[in-house]
Amino acid sequence: MKKKLLIIGGGFAGFWSAISAVRQSREIQKRGEVEIILVDPDNNVTIRPALNELSLEGLSFAMDRYLKPLGVHQILGKAEKISPEKNEVIVYTTNGVIILSYDYLILATGVSLNAPDLPGFQHTFNVDSFASAQRLENHLVELAEKEFHEEGASTIIVVGSEFTGLETVTGIERNARTIQAYYSGKSAQFKIILLESESRVASGFSEECRQYIQEVLASKNIEVRLNCALTIIGPASVLLNNGTRISTRTVIWTKGLAASFLTKFLKGPKDDLNRLSVDPFLKVPAYNNVIAAGSIAHSSGDKAIASLMDCQYAQFEGRWAGHNAMNDLFGVPLKKYVEPGYIACPDLGEPLAAYENEQDKAIKKIRYRQRAAERHLNRTTIFPWQDIEATIKASYPEFPFLNNQSYTA
């Protein structure tokens, strides 16, 4: 009887777990002795870091193009409950509820925005998923078709000043103007506001980075309001905690990520983001047959700092997760997770246009290179290879994919 490896989650960690498991099962000559099953509501892997960009075209790839030829069984459904004592997962599908048993489990269900208990929160937008980004784009199209003339239509508020918030707020006016030019041809005066509940923007960045971020925000005429939080959100206005009312029809929320609710079914410590703590092999210590990978895992590998909730880390950990799960199933030694390296390049749009001296000119060149690196990561290296067997080879844990140029969407 074949052993069953069950992977819950079809993001980057889940996808690469499946690819790596296929590769390693071949490597140890056990491919015919294991069934690999991947469960996710969607067949598409979304390129989430690029969802703040204007065009959503090409920001996903279909998993079945890779998994079906490799014999990975896909189930389109949502996992609702894990029973680790029984080695079972309850999955809701369009055809009804099914119970899946497993010999080994990889949990890779990622994170999502943690909606606050805020009156009118349903009126906000976000770029947390492809569907959410599409909803925001459709909303801007509707406003553009009315020439942004409705009260508050040309005022856009972005809440939160970390990675997603900064990339969104520095590019949203460009997006709105492009949509406006296409759908109305008339020009509106946009007002872009960044709300931050803390006393400074980008608190997670270094002081040098923060200084540049502040310069970019100022150069783009983005109004920054610190120590500010929303208390009520309406369809055409918001109320701040200081009593100020702002007319706006577009509030983009970027704060409050939390790991999947499925972590509650597993024993063991969790961090303040609800991520499962894992050992050096990415195993959940309370179980001998469960690995957590990607944004749902609190891991540090050989580093002192835990991994971020980020697609790059998810790709790394997925490669290790599939490899180690397959080895563990068949009594082969596991590999300790080693963080291969991380490139943090927030895309703040075009660098500052003017410079006064050679030092400023050199800084501008660096910013162009950083932006090019971010675009290269989000549009090229983050995708798997077109060739399936090349993708298999790239699933080795130590594969140096950040230095490879052969990725293509």
Image (cartoon, rainbow, N blue to C red):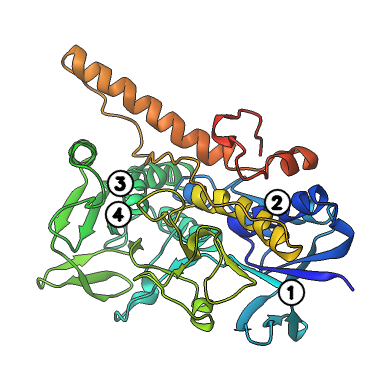
Residue found at x 70% / y 71%: 104
Residue placed furthest toward the top: 358
Callout 4: SS: loop
Q: Are marks 4 and 3 in contact (CB under 8 Å)?
A: yes
The residue under label 4 is 154
**In this rendering, does residue 166 appear at all?**
yes
Q: CA distance from mark 1 to mark 3?
A: 59 Å
Of labels 1 and 4, the one closer to you: 1
Label whose residue precedes the other's in the sequence (3 or 2): 2
- Earlier in the chain: of badge 2 and badge 4, it is 2
Crowding around mark 3 (Cα neighbors within 10 Å: few <14, some 14 to 19, many 20+) is: some
Image depth: mark 2 or mark 1 in front: 1
- What's the residue at 62%, 82% (across, down)? 84
Residue occupying image coordinates x 17% and y 52%: 224
Under mark 2, the amino acid is Ser
Q: Which mark is residue 103?
A: 1
Q: Are marks 2 and 4 in contact (CB under 8 Å)?
A: no
Report the amino acid beneath label 1. Asp
Residue 355 place in picture, x, y as percent: 20, 19
Q: Which mark's residue is nearer the viewer, 2 or 4?
A: 2
- Rendering coords of residue 99 (x, y %): 74, 85
- Work out whether 88 lies above or below 22: below
Q: Which residue is mark 3?
A: 188
